[in-house]
Image: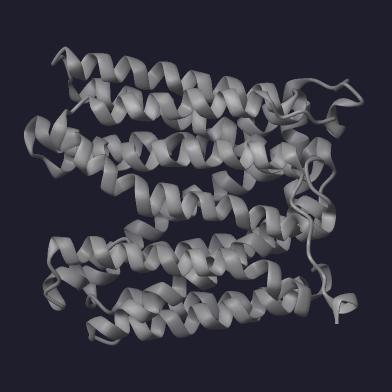
């Protein structure tokens, strides 16, 4: 019996340090994500102020994705990630000091949010590109699942609840905690000892030439082209469904603000289940079949969310998170396998720029569809977009995955 028992070894120690850093920084992100809108709303009570601060934090992902990826491909990624964490530590420590001195303005919050987004765009381009140097090829799904778990638990589940509590105690305290999380993350990443393959041959081309090469590769590489088209369409549909969901839940289904928070947590738990299941799924099925099943489940989930029953909507929401996270891990691992190490940062950065652009368009579409047709219509739109993307891009995905 023992001869048939297979126990997977632990992931390498350098990856475990990167994972620990992800837990630390994601916890800080979750604390800040709850506190920053509260501080913004407290300035003048304007929804526009809250939206502007939020937009300032996401703008760098759309604008700086490819440049940040180019930077990650031209430099050693471990020091770059450390620098990004330390940069965010300085920004957060400064914001905490401003809040403590009661000198907060909308401009200060917008500037801090934008600078944080810039640092995160760099770190988020470099970290996935580093992964193939840390773990074996056949364990990429497992490693990406571990990082998704850190984000879902620390950023989406634990951090926000603590952030709200800390804000009630002291408006500056959440940002002190966030600053400390970046300092801890930087210290942990600094201990990652790895031979970064893309640095074996220093770049002979210019920065602009590398940037153009990254954009070109994102189109000519069949894996990047197919998976990129898929996830951009999925992002468009899913954000269109999720962006106005608060109106559906609170006005149509009479969900309280507390209930809304619980609802969001249940969705995160669904995503956590998806992240933890990928390792087992890819051992039993081909990545394409796992991705196809996740797409089918996504369609079903959005259709369930269109049913005006809170239990049914909750189940659909959790299923959508599980399916989307599962598919995302499959896609990320496929990109990491198919792209040379020297191009991974640019590949990741290009995709992130497209994703955040699609998210912006999707949010606007979702609001327009909800207001113009009805609060359930965005879910039907998302299901249709997902089904259409599967039909149109599925054949090319079968060839490359």
Toward the front, the furthest residue is 2
Q: Residue at x 62, y 49 (%)?
A: 351
Q: Is residue 204 left or right of residue 249?
A: right
Q: Residue at x 37, y 85 (%)?
A: 304
Percent x, y of residue 104 = 18, 19
Q: Quadrant of residue 122?
A: top right
User: Looking at the image, what colour scheme do you see?
Assistant: one colour
Looking at the image, residue 300 lies above or below residue 155: below
Q: Residue at x 69, y 75 (%)?
A: 281
Between 329 and 118, the one nearer to me in the picture: 329
Is residue 51 visible in the rendered image? The answer is: no
Percent x, y of residue 382 = 43, 74
Looking at the image, residue 105 lies above or below residue 68: above
Q: Quadrant of residue 189?
A: top right
Between 393 and 126, the one nearer to me in the picture: 126
Percent x, y of residue 165 = 20, 41
Q: Which quadrant, please, contains the N terminus?
A: bottom right
Between 233 and 97, the one nearer to me in the picture: 97
Percent x, y of residue 357 = 48, 49
Looking at the image, residue 193 lies above or below residue 301: above
Looking at the image, residue 355 lies above or below residue 48: below
Toward the left, the furthest residue is 44
Q: Quadrant of residue 98?
A: top left
Q: Residue at x 32, y 60 (%)?
A: 243
Is residue 238 visible in the rendered image? The answer is: yes
Q: Which quadrant, please, contains the C terminus?
A: bottom right
């Amino acid at each position: 019996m023992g001869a048939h028992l297979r126990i997977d070894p632990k992931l390498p120690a350098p990856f475990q340090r990167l994972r620990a850093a992800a837990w630390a920084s994601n916890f800080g992100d979750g604390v800040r994500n709850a506190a920053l809108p509260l501080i913004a709303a407290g300035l003048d009570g304007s929804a526009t102020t809250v939206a502007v601060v939020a937009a300032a934090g996401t703008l760098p992902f759309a604008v700086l994705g490819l440049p940040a990826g180019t930077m990650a491909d031209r430099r050693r990624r471990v020091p770059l990630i450390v620098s990004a964490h330390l940069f965010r530590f300085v920004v957060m420590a400064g914001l905490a000091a401003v809040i403590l001195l009661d000198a907060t303005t909308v401009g200060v919050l917008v500037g801090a949010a934008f600078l944080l987004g810039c640092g995160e765009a760099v770190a988020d381009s470099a970290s996935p590109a580093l992964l193939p140097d840390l773990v074996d090829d056949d364990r990429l799904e497992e490693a990406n699942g571990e990082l998704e778990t850190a984000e879902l638990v620390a950023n989406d589940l634990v951090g926000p609840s603590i952030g709200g509590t800390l804000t009630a105690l002291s408006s500056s305290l959440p940002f002190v905690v966030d600053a400390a999380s970046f300092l801890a993350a930087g210290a942990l990443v600094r201990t990652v000892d790895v031979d970064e393959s893309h640095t074996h041959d220093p770049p002979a081309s210019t920065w602009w030439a590398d940037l153009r090469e990254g954009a070109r590769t994102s189109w000519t590489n069949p894996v990047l082209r197919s998976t990129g088209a898929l996830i951009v369409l999925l992002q468009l549909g899913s954000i269109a469904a999720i962006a106005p969901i608060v109106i559906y839940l609170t006005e149509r289904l009479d969900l309280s603000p507390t209930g809304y928070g619980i609802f969001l947590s249940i969705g995160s738990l669904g995503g956590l289940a998806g992240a933890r299941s990928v390792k087992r799924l890819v051992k039993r099925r081909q990545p394409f079949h796992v991705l196809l099943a996740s797409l089918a489940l996504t369609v079903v989930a959005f259709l369930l969310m269109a049913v005006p029953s809170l239990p049914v909507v909750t189940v659909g929401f959790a299923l959508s998170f599980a399916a989307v996270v599962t598919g995302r891990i499959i896609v990320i691992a496929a990109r990491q396998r198919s792209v040379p190490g020297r191009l991974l940062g640019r590949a990741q950065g290009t995709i992130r720029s497209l994703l955040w652009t699609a998210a912006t368009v999707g949010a606007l579409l979702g609001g327009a569809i909800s207001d113009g047709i009805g609060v359930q219509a965005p879910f039907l739109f998302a299901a249709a977009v997902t089904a259409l993307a599967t039909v149109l891009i599925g054949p090319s995905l079968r060839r490359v995955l």
